[in-house]
Amino acid sequence: MGSNALNFEIKLKRENKIYYENDVLVGCVHFSCPSEAKHDGISLSLEGIVNLQLSNSKSVGLLDAFYNSLKPIQLLNSTIDLSAPGKLNAGNTEFHFEFPLKCNKEPKVLYETYHGLFININYQLRCDVKRSFLAKSLQKTQQFCIQYKPPSGAEAIVAPAKEANFSISPESIQKNSKERITMPRFLITGKLEKTEFCITQPLRGSLTIQHTEVAIKSIELQLLRVETCGCKEGYAKDSTEIQTIQIVDGNICPRLEIPIYMVLPRLFSCPTLITKNFKIEFEVNLVIVFKDDYIISENFPIVLKRLNGPLGSKSSTRGI
């Protein structure tokens, strides 16, 4: 029997595939067989894993110290038998299932789904159809997303966020540098409306070129992830770019307010997460490129949360 004679897929009842801790994962495995199909058992597994790894540049000489802290962290792991060995009748067959989404061991919490470079938090269902050695066993997977449930009631009350004002000039850059650097005279001022905000809300702000001796070529806004793996014996910290948007192209009139607006990507960002074995944090770089390709940048750490929104509305809890 060819592998094409048995087709199946894992279907979830919730179309957006977004779930919260303590929800029940409900769905079915749908089989479509053009003719009767033998099998040696059908099982369905639920998996939730945090995978950690070191960057190649930091792996040398650190593996011993990191061995224990880099082991995968299992958040969910359970298996059910959908069918004992037997036959699937020709036509359509469905096996329905329910899985409670609860982490019963340390860390006793389901972290949000996150796809990073050195840290990945994944949740999936895997269906295995065992068959004899003459017919290859089959496997299908279905990923789903875990999100933190936005707080409600008194927990949802958030203190008003303070603006983060900035002023970038040769003096401010020299203040943070150990060596003297010759650079053109300029002054760029602006603000970020807040550096601690809901992940479903955009990063907002503005900037103004007060004056500059050299024309500006471009201004960009970079979103960075800062992933830290390790424990008290040692750790590796890597900062990598998630996305970059250009907010200015070419020279700009002085004293003209330029808006800053960035929507955060869902799967490549998550609420700021700090645990004993790893951290997921985020930063924003404001990058100014002058006509002679001289580049300066200003860094802003940001804190992301899962909230209902500034006025308690549910519009910010949308899915992917």
Image (cartoon, rainbow, N blue to C red):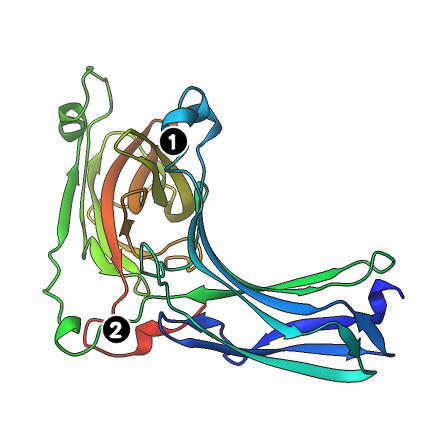
- The image quadrant of residue 220 is top left
Pointers 1 and 2 in contact (CB under 8 A)? no
Mark 1 and mark 2: Cα distance apart in space: 38 Å
Of the pair 229 and 201, the residue shown nearer to us: 229
Against 62, is 13 above or below?
A: below
- Location of the C terminus by quadrant is bottom left
Q: How busy is the neighbourhood of tag 1: few (under 14 within 10 Å), some, or many (20 plus)?
A: many
- The image quadrant of residue 136 is bottom right
Against 30, is 205 above or below?
A: above
> Tag on residue 211?
none
Q: Where residue 143 sits: x, y (%)?
A: 54, 63
Residue at 20% from the left image edge and 15% from the top image edge: 179
Q: Is residue 113 left or right of residue 313?
A: right
Q: Where residue 227 sits: x, y (%)?
A: 35, 41
Residue under numbered circle 1: 66
Residue under numbered circle 2: 308
Kind of residue indicated by mark 2? Asn
- The image quadrant of residue 85 is bottom right
Q: In this view, does 2 lie to the left or right of 265?
A: right
Which tag, 1 or 2, sits closer to the chain's start? 1
Of circles 1 and 2, the one toward us is 1
Point out the residue furthest to the right here: 1
